[in-house]
Structure formats: C-alpha cells, structure tokens
Image (cartoon, rainbow, N blue to C red):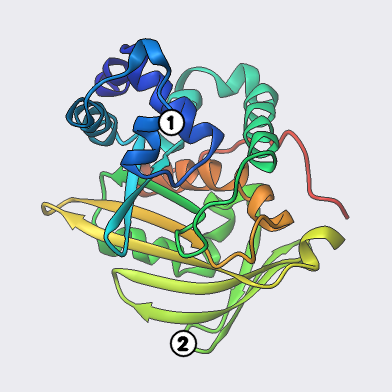
Amino acid sequence: MDDIFAALAHPARRRLLDLLFERDGRTLGDLERHLPQDMQMTRFGVMKHLRVLEDAHLVTTRKVGREKHHYLNPAPLQLVADRWISRYAAPFLRAMSDLKTHLEERTTPMTPSAPRHVYELYIRATAQAVWDIITDDAKTPLYQHFNMTSRTDWRVGGSIEFLMGDRAVIAGEILALEPPQRLTMSFHARWSPEVAADKPSRVTWEITPVGTDACKLTLVHDGFDGETATSKAVVSGWPETLSRLKTLAETGIPFAMEPAYAPAG
C-alpha cells in the first residue's frame, strides 16, 4: 500500500483524481486544460503524474480510437478501507460513493463510445483460480454485493440471473465466454422501477496473468444509453464486490460486510 500513499502525497495528483471523481473517462488534453492556474504544467508533467497514479492502480486507462481515456479506480482505496476503516465506518463509505454518483449527475456526459465504468486490481491468485470463482454459482454469495446468489446457464447465449432471496434483481445473457480470460454478459438491473426502465448494459470481466501466481482483473461496465439510473447506481456496488472477490481468491475466506442500505423492494 506504500505506492498508494506515495501517489496521494502530491497535490497535483490529488487534483487529477478530483477531476476524474467529477467526471470519469477524461483524456490527457481534458485533464491538462482543467488543472487550476497554480498547478499548470507541461503535457509531459501531467503524463508523469498520471503514470504514478497508474502505477499505484488509482487510475486505469482505456483506448478508444486514437484517444486514451482515464478512469478513477476506487478498488485500491476500498482495500485500504477494508483493512482499517470499514469495521467502524462502512455507512460513511457508502455515503462517499453516493456523493460520487450525485456529482456525476451534474457533469457533462462522456463520449458515448467510451466505457462508463472501468475498475482494475491485481490479485495474488492465478487467472484460473479467479475464473473458477466468478463462473461458479455456488461461490457468488461469497463475494457479490448484498451476498446475492446466481443462477447461470454457462454457455454463450445462456441466461444469468442474480437473486436476492427468490427475486431476480439482475438478469442478463452470456455474450462471450473465453476461459480463463474473458466473460461478457448483458446486465439488466431490476431492483427498482427506475433501473428496470433502463435498457440492458454490458459487463466484461477480463483476467490477465501476471507471472505464474498472480493476475490483473479488469471489470468494464459500459453500453449504457447515456446517464441512466443504472449507470449511477452501480458505482456503489462494484468496488465492494471486487474487494471481496480479491479477499476470497487470495485467502479462501469470504470477507463479510454488512450493507449500509438495501435496494428498493
């Protein structure tokens, strides 16, 4: 975690994270233009600071055509919270996630072709081990938000449902199944009338081996029809899900977390 705290130590890097907090998916030029006057620097200087944030996994990037889009990656900060904070202040962390959602409601929409949410973290487990967890319905409640269960027909074109009790709160279809590196599914939220009215979006899990006993997990949630109720709601759930998945893959022990709120019934 030393690299996280070192990356946060510089005010310019904190400001870059603030800009991504206000609106995800910014390009280098956009970030450069929106730095305050007292932090103006060369394009190369901005690139250096972004590289430090990327190395600490606080920022992740995605190429769209010739442009690189930058995303705030909250997963490492969630891990810090899990270690020292969540036992005492989980409701306040949820409030911070809700604040991010509230701020995003006021900002200019991103380029439609750019992914809406991108999360990235490294796991001390093989790609196969992580794949075996996310494609095993029996393990879903050990890491999923709200301890949801799932019911899946594991083939391309097969259905997938995430349930709370007997109620399906997310429904989708398997769009790509490439073990042990890529899983793509459509995502139709149904936990409230607001999200149920949205068109289905898309979730992609990408697992890249790093050496022999570790991997990089990237989750991309895109395909939204603009700023939808679903795109705003999922901000709170994914960091917790990924944090719990990492704990489970590395230790074999589920990380229990009491939710600060529940979806509307």
Q: Is residue 62 above or below residue 182?
A: above
Discs 2, 1 touching: Cβ within 8 Å: no
Q: Which amino acid lies under the numbered mark 2 shown in the image of this protein?
A: Arg
Where in the figure is residue 235, as x and y percent of width and height?
60, 45
At horizontal 59% and vertical 51% (from top left) the residue drawn is 109
Distance between mark 2 and mark 1 Cα atoms: 32 Å
Q: Is residue 157 above or below residue 23?
A: below
Residue 167 makes an appearance in the image: no
Which structural element holds mark 2? loop
Quarter occupied by residue 193: bottom right
For residue 262, which numbered disc appears in the image? none
Which structural element holds mark 1? helix
Q: Is residue 7 left or right of residue 85?
A: left
Toward the viewer: 219 or 245? 219
Where in the figure is residue 61, as x and y percent of width and height?
32, 48
For residue 155, which numbered disc appears in the image? 2
At horizontal 74% and vertical 67% (from top left) the residue drawn is 198
Q: How many marks?
A: 2
At horizontal 34% and vertical 21% (from top left) the residue drawn is 13
Instruction: Please identify the quadrant where the C terminus is shown.
Output: bottom right
Q: Which amino acid lies under the numbered mark 1 shown in the image of this protein?
A: Leu
Q: Is residue 221 left or right of residue 199?
A: left
Q: Residues within 10 Å of mark 2 (few under 14, many from 20)?
A: few
Q: Is residue 119 left or right of residue 139?
A: left
Where in the figure is residue 67, as x and y percent of width and height?
30, 55
For residue 79, which numbered disc appears in the image? 1
Instruction: Please identify the quadrant where the N terminus is shown.
Output: top left
- Which is nearer the N-term, disc 2 or disc 1? 1
